[in-house]
Image (cartoon, rainbow, N blue to C red):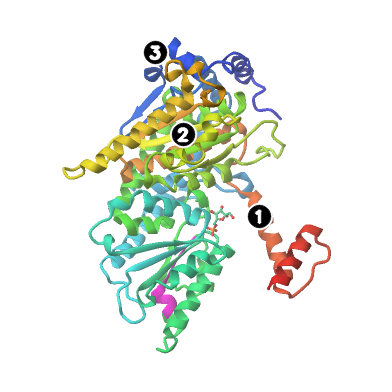
């Protein structure tokens, strides 16, 4: 099955036979207006594709390919709640979570926008209560420490956003200490609990399914810690659960079964994919960090991107163009590694967020009609704060043997205000590094004279395609735009590849097998049918205990 065996696909293969050999540096020489030709602006955000190995013809052919794949129809189906997550028989409606209250969208006869805003209002009451110091622990002390327990989509989005938007705290949210616990092995929670005051700590158990063992194991440890702390005061478990636990889930009954009373529930819906859920009540930590107004600004920014995605011709559509240049790199230039390089320490968790968003969505080898794909899909994605990565893996980007496409993400303005001279200078230094690196990666050492006379080990071959995403400033609004941009990019690529980006069957088997191995590790049962490696490792572990 080859989705590129079409007219536009064939033209693109043909086009790649010539352009595949071209060097980005010579493309800049041939066309001094590349920046004007290949950069796209929206209020607050700009996408520069001029350092990609593309010409106008490339983009025309890629847009033709998108039309062949009926991308318009798919975008419409996504936004209107068609059941495009076929293997789970449901829509993927994360865009509804940021749709303004005056709009409607019916799913199975229910206006879900109304429901979304009711839930936001419920979350707002809770956030205000905590910020006002009115949520009291068992001893009557106000809660001032929140621990979010979740993993994957129930952790990465809020964790990233709280780090990115930390400076947008409000007067009330400033006094709240926020922690994130996700690791199954207990490393996060064990080191944290020693430092916390149980009388002032509230645990938010975030899990769409409320069955994820990582989260439930950490939640259980937290509950036992509180029970031990309160034991001598004779506080009963129901009170501990009512005062010190909030549940956020799409499965209310499981929260009740675990012991969280209904008053402490926040809901979302099965049509919100885990990795698309930070816009829902899973975003509670974000709202606790930056206040509800900030949270709503983030939603509004994402909605601006949704509208742009829906209404703009492919030729100027920022998520579509970002996706299509990725398709060009992956499927026509053979590039299967993708580095995410934020030049902004506040975006330090963006790479791990995008690892899940992109690789859990599009890391698939079967089409929507269950055939094996005959082409590459999602590349390997990784990243790090750009300037830190310069001192770590940039050696490979510059002089290694594999082609890598790179996203540079930064903001033009930072540290406004009169007393920030030193920090402003640091920001400029950071920007000069961001621009220098993308320049060398794309153009190679042609950027300095006489480089061709240097020995091979000092040469920089360049020709690594680079994208720059430049925010005017990092605010809740532009941050919302940025994340929605990547969500839509992932969707567009899934349409071209004819795969379902909203399921994740590849993570299931590991859960089943791990459950089966547990008795052998606890010594409750032997499993002679295991392969010799797994059996040998279990034996070795057990002899060490
Ligand atoms: O195992 C993968 C996964 O299902 C992700 O898709 C999801 O984001 C994560 O686990 C957490 O799931 P839940 O929110 O149901 O605990």
Q: Which residue is mark 3?
A: 32
User: In what element is the residue under mark 3?
Assistant: loop
Is residue 302 placed above or below 461 in the rendered structure? below
Distance, label 2 to label 1, CA atoms, is 30 Å
Q: Image point 68% across, 65% down: which residue?
A: 515
- The picture places residue 18, in percent across and down from the top left corner, at 59, 13
Image quarter hosting the N terminus: top right
Q: Cβ(mark 1) to ligand 1 < 8 Å?
A: yes
For this rendering, which residue is in front, 138 or 26?
A: 26
- The picture places residue 136, in percent across and down from the top left corner, at 32, 75
Image quarter hosting the C terminus: bottom right
Q: Is residue 261 magenta?
A: no
Mark 1 or 3 closer to N-term? 3
Q: Is residue 246 magenta?
A: yes
User: In what element is the residue under mark 1?
Assistant: helix
- The picture places residue 377, in percent across and down from the top left corner, at 62, 35
Residue 257: name its quadrant.
bottom right
Residue range of the region highlighted in magenta in the rendering: 240-249
Residue 319 relative to residue 330: left or right: left
Q: Which residue is mark 2?
A: 407
The numbered dot on residue 488 is: none
């Amino acid at each position: 099955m080859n989705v590129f065996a079409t007219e536009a696909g064939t033209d693109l293969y043909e086009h790649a036979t010539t352009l595949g050999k071209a060097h980005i540096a010579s493309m800049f020489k041939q066309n001094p207006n590349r920046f004007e030709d290949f950069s796209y602006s929206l209020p607050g955000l700009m996408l520069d594709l001029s350092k990609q190995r593309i010409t106008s013809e490339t983009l025309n052919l890629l847009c033709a390919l998108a039309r062949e794949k009926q991308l318009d129809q798919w975008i419409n189906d996504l936004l209107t709640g068609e059941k495009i997550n076929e293997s789970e028989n449901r829509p993927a409606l994360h865009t509804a979570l940021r749709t303004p209250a005056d709009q409607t969208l019916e799913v199975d006869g229910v206006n879900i926008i109304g429901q979304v805003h009711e839930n936001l209002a419920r979350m707002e009451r809770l956030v205000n209560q905590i910020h006002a110091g009115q949520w009291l622990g068992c001893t009557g002390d106000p809660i001032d420490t929140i621990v979010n327990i979740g993993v994957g989509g129930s952790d990465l989005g809020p964790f990233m956003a709280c780090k990115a938007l930390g400076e947008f705290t409000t007067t009330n949210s400033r006094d709240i200490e926020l922690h994130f616990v996700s690791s199954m092995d207990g490393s996060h929670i064990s080191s944290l609990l020693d430092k916390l005051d149980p009388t002032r700590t509230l645990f938010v158990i975030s899990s769409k399914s409320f069955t994820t063992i990582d989260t439930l194991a950490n939640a259980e440890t937290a509950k036992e810690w509180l029970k031990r702390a309160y034991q001598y005061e004779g506080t009963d478990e129901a009170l501990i659960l009512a005062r010190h636990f909030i549940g956020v889930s799409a499965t209310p009954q499981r929260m009740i079964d675990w012991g969280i009373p209904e008053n402490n529930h926040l809901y979302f819906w099965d049509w919100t994919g885990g990795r698309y859920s930070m816009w829902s009540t899973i975003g509670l930590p974000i709202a606790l960090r930056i206040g509800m107004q900030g949270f709503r600004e983030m939603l509004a920014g994402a909605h601006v991107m949704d509208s742009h995605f829906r209404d703009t011709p492919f030729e100027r559509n920022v998520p579509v163009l970002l996706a299509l240049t990725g398709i060009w790199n992956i499927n026509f230039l053979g590039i299967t590694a993708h580095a995410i390089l934020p030049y902004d320490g506040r975006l330090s968790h963006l790479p791990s967020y995008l690892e899940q968003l992109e690789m859990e969505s599009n890391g698939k080898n079967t089409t929507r009609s269950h055939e094996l794909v005959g082409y590459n899909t999602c590349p390997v994605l990784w990243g790090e704060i750009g300037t830190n990565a310069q001192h770590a893996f940039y050696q490979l980007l510059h002089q290694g043997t594999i082609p890598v496409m790179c996203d540079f993400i930064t903001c033009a303005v930072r540290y406004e205000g009169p007393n920030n001279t030193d920090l402003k200078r640091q920001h400029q230094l950071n920007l000069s590094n961001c621009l220098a690196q993308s320049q060398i990666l794309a153009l190679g050492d042609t950027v300095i004279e006489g480089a061709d006379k240097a020995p091979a080990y000092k040469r920089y071959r360049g020709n690594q395609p680079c994208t720059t995403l430049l925010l005017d400033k990092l605010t809740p609004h532009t941050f919302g735009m940025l994340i929605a941009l990547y969500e839509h990019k992932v969707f567009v690529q899934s349409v071209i590849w004819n795969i379902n980006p909203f399921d994740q069957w590849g993570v299931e088997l590991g859960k089943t097998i791990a459950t089966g191995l547990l008795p052998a590790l606890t010594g409750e049962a032997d499993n002679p049918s295991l392969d010799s490696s797994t059996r040998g490792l279990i034996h070795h572990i057990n002899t060490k205990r």
